[in-house]
Amino acid sequence: MSQEPIFERLAALLLERLRREMVPAVLNSPDDIKMTYPGSETDYRFGVFLYNMEELRSCGPPASIRMDEETRRHPDRLLALHFLLYANRKVPFDSLSVLDEMVLVEAAMRAAHSMGPLTLDGQAVRSALHDPVLSEKTALWQSLSSPLQPAVYLTLEPVRVPSSRIRRTPAVREFQLNSKRKGVSQV
């Protein structure tokens, strides 16, 4: 398993897919799409921002992963990552018009809607459009000090984050059981 940052590699795969769909159809350059947060830079036209993550819980506690006879790794965490795909309204040159923003958001919606699973470390990561309620959208944009604007909300799951906590569990070499019957001792 690779020790490279998982979120970074997944973000690169997501950007690659978006660029494949949106460049040159609605954007001129791959540099027009960046992983950033609203208001951070002004030299991009379309932004992708990881705004939330949540743990996915299956039924019951996850089991440790056997690495060899005497070594176990703590269970992986399964996460859902929530991304915000938005047009950058603060482009300094070639200012973004309302129609440009609509075209970009529609292109992102099409790309997200037609996106198949991403493959990360041999595992399929599904993508799904997510539609938060208006109050959640408003709270998100307010927390970013930006007015509410049209955007695509995309969820990628399950994202497997391996634990680095490893424990040694020696194998059982001998087992002895003593039992007693009422009134009689047996070995």
Image (cartoon, rainbow, N blue to C red):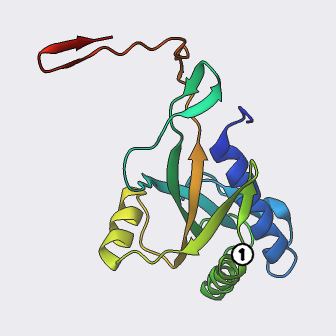
Which residue is located at x 68 percent, y 67 percent? Answer: 46
Quarter of the image that includes the C terminus = top left
Does any portion of residue 89 appear in the rendered image? no
Q: Position of residue 6 (x, y in %)?
A: 66, 43
Q: Is residue 25 visible?
A: yes
Name above or below for residue 29 compared with residue 74. below
| Vertical placement of residue 84 versus 115, above or below | above
> Mark 1 highlights which residue?
115
User: Extreme front residue here?
Assistant: 184
Residue 186's spot in the image, x, y percent? Answer: 28, 13
Residue 184, image x, y percentages: 18, 14
Question: In which quadrant of the rendered view does residue 72 lie?
Answer: top right
Identify the residue shown where x is 59% and y is 37%: 162
Q: Nearer the viewer, residue 7 or 165?
A: 165
Q: Residue at x 80, y 76 (%)?
A: 21
- Tell me what residue is drawn at x 42 percent, y 73 percent: 148
| Image coords of residue 121 (percent x, y) | 74, 47
Name the one closer to the observer, 35 or 5: 5
Mark 1 residue type: Met
- Location of residue 186 with respect to 74 vertically, above or below: above
